[in-house]
Image (tube, rainbow, N blue to C red):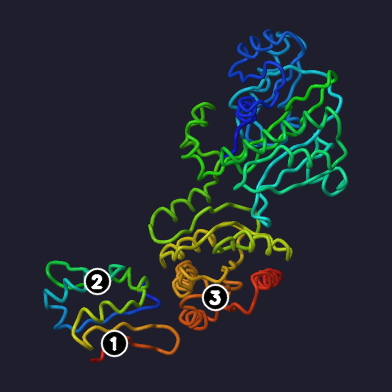
């Protein structure tokens, strides 16, 4: 079943960067990111486990990772600096 | 962990509390005969099961001779009581009784201290005595920090009018019971009835002991003496399939707790927890006339999937019409995570969360996000300005239209 509460978007160019991809996999406490054959994957099953810690936002360049809440007033968490 | 009667008596015997003559457990009819012969007089044979209602079920029989004891033991060993097969038959001497008393020590949650209870009306349910004959019951709290004094036991026993030599004997037994309670991490040590025999001596006719589960590691030496495996889990009945599935839900994910799932036969599923909140909420639901379908304890910030799987388990139970999701104010459990879990559980089963969740009352950390989720799905929720009792009432009220 698709995630009900959280969606995560990663800029396509950033997803190809092996170092950043590895960092995203490493920092996420609920395993939303995975690396398969060198490509960064979003693990759909784990999206709803997102604890909104923002570690992924800080692991990538500003604005390149977005965490979207799919409830309430639609909110997008993104690093701006 | 509950002890069988023979284990309770063995413990009492080790502490100098007098037992009926020759009290020993037999695993076979032949062994029962041998014990009866060694006692050399009338005996009582008692089924060893962790269940009440033994007398009514035919699990307690009397025999005047060893041959009669064989027949009685055969009957008892073949008799299941409330689904429990006996682990043995306790054989002990029978003597004429003059009077029965009650003495027990348990934990008083309100006083946060142990409480000892004494009554000169033993042999019946102590709650019944408390309700119908309060003048025949005395209670006294005591500290676990200071050494237990005999004087406290004496005051207790004297409070119901016992005096003289009888007071001295009962004081000694009560003191030994209280010290046993403290020394061995017990949650209940009870003798009912404690009998005064025709010759003026006292014996423990029946005993109950419950040990705090967490005390087992520190009580390995005692458990070894009683021949109880410290890893053995004693329950009043075997776990149901629903309860076993609850264990699977809890153990499948290390994050947080969704444990102690207990099955009841009601129609309102409960997802409850938080620092004693489960018991309070369960009682509150019943106080409002609700019929819980289960008990459980969630906390420690369970993952979304754990809360989701628990919700699915409860909603899949036949007869469950709605669930109530209620906790005390939480700090280390996130409201939004539990909200996601219970909503997801409903959605994955094809239910409308607004229809299936009677009430969501979990105030605390991340409640802003939690309440946004609930609003998004049209689920009725309340914050800490609504008491747990009131929230339980609202859930029960909704069941009337379900």
Callout 1 secondary element: strand
The residue at 74%/39% (across/down) is B151
Residues at marks 2 and 3, CA–CA distance in whole angstroms: 29 Å
| Above or below, A20 relative to B92 | below
Label 3 sits on a secondary structure element that is: loop
Q: Quadrant of the N terminus of chain A?
A: bottom left
Q: Pick the residue in front: B378 or B66.
A: B66
- The first of marks 2 and 1 along the sequence is 2
Q: Are discs 1 and 3 both within one chain?
A: no
Q: Position of residue B238 (x, y in %)?
A: 56, 40
Of all chains, the one bearing label 2 is A
Q: Is residue B216 above or below residue A33?
A: above
Q: Which mark is residue A27?
A: 2
- The percent coordinates of residue A63 (x first, y second) are 23, 88
- Quadrant housing residue A12: bottom left
- Is disc 2 surrounded by few (<14), some (14 to 19) or many (20+) residues within 10 Å? some
Q: Which residue is nearer to you in this view: B254 or B130?
A: B130
Q: Are the residues tagged 1 and 3 within 8 Å (C-beta)?
A: no
> Residue B297 in the image: x percent, y percent?
53, 59
Does any portion of residue B142 appear in the rendered image?
yes
Q: Quadrant of residue B174?
A: top right
Camera-nearest label, 1 or 3:
3
Could you tell me if the residues under marks 2 and 1 are in contact, i.e. CB atoms within 8 Å?
no
Q: Any mark on residue A78, and which?
A: 1
Q: Is residue B28 left or right of residue B171?
A: left
Position of B66 compared to A24: left or right? right
Q: Chain of mark 3?
A: B
Question: Circle 3: is it few (<14), some (14-19), or many (20+) Cα within 10 Å?
Answer: many
Task: Answer few, some or many: residues within 10 Å of disc 1's Cα (few below 14, many 20 plus, some between 14 and 19).
Answer: some
Task: State the residue position of label 3.
Answer: B363
User: Residue at horizontal 60%, vertical 34%?
Assistant: B3
Toward the viewer: B162 or B362?
A: B162
């Amino acid at each position: 079943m698709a995630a009900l509460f959280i969606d995560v978007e990663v800029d396509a160019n950033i997803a190809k960067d092996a170092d950043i991809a590895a960092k995203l996999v490493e920092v996420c406490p609920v395993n939303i990111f995975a690396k398969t054959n060198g490509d960064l994957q979003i693990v759909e099953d784990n999206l709803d486990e997102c604890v909104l810690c923002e570690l992924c936002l800080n692991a990538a360049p500003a604005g390149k990772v977005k965490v979207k809440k799919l409830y309430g007033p639609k909110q997008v968490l993104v690093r701006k600096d | 962990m509950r002890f069988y009667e023979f284990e309770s008596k063995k413990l009492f015997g080790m502490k100098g509390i007098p037992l009926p003559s020759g009290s020993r457990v037999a695993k076979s009819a032949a062994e029962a005969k041998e014990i009866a012969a060694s006692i050399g007089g009338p005996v009582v044979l008692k089924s060893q099961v962790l269940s009440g209602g033994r007398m009514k079920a035919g699990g307690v029989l009397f025999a005047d001779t060893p041959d009669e004891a064989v027949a009685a033991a055969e009957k008892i060993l073949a008799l299941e009581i409330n689904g429990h097969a006996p682990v043995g038959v306790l054989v002990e001497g029978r003597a004429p009784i003059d009077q029965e008393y009650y003495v027990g020590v348990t934990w008083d949650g309100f006083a946060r201290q142990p409480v000892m209870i004494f009554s000169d009306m033993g042999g019946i349910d102590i709650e019944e005595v408390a309700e119908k004959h309060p003048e025949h019951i005395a209670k006294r709290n005591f500290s676990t920090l200071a050494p237990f004094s005999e004087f406290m036991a004496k005051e207790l026993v004297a409070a119901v009018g016992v005096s003289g030599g009888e007071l001295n004997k009962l004081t000694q037994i009560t003191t030994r019971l209280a010290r046993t309670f403290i020394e061995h991490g017990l949650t209940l040590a009870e003798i009912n009835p404690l009998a005064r025999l025709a010759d003026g001596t006292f014996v423990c006719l029946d005993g109950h002991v419950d040990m705090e589960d967490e005390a087992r590691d520190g009580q390995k030496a005692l458990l070894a003496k009683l021949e109880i495996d410290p890893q053995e889990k004693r329950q009043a009945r075997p776990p149901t399939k629903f309860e076993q599935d609850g264990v699977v839900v809890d153990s499948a994910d290390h994050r947080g707790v969704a444990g102690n799932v207990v099955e009841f036969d009601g129609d309102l599923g409960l997802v409850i927890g938080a620092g004693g909140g489960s018991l309070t909420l369960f009682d509150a639901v019943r106080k409002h006339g609700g019929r819980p379908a289960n008990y459980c304890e969630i906390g420690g910030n369970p993952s979304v999937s754990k809360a989701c799987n628990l919700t699915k388990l409860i909603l899949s139970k036949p007869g469950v019409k709605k669930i109530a999701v209620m906790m005390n104010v939480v700090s280390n459990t996130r409201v939004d995570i539990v909200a996601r879990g219970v909503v997801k559980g409903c959605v994955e089963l094809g239910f409308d969360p607004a229809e299936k969740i009677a009430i969501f009352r979990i105030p605390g950390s991340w409640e802003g996000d939690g309440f946004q989720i609930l609003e998004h799905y049209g689920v009725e929720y309340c914050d800490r300005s609504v008491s747990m009792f009131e929230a339980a009432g609202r859930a029960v009220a909704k069941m009337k239209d379900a």
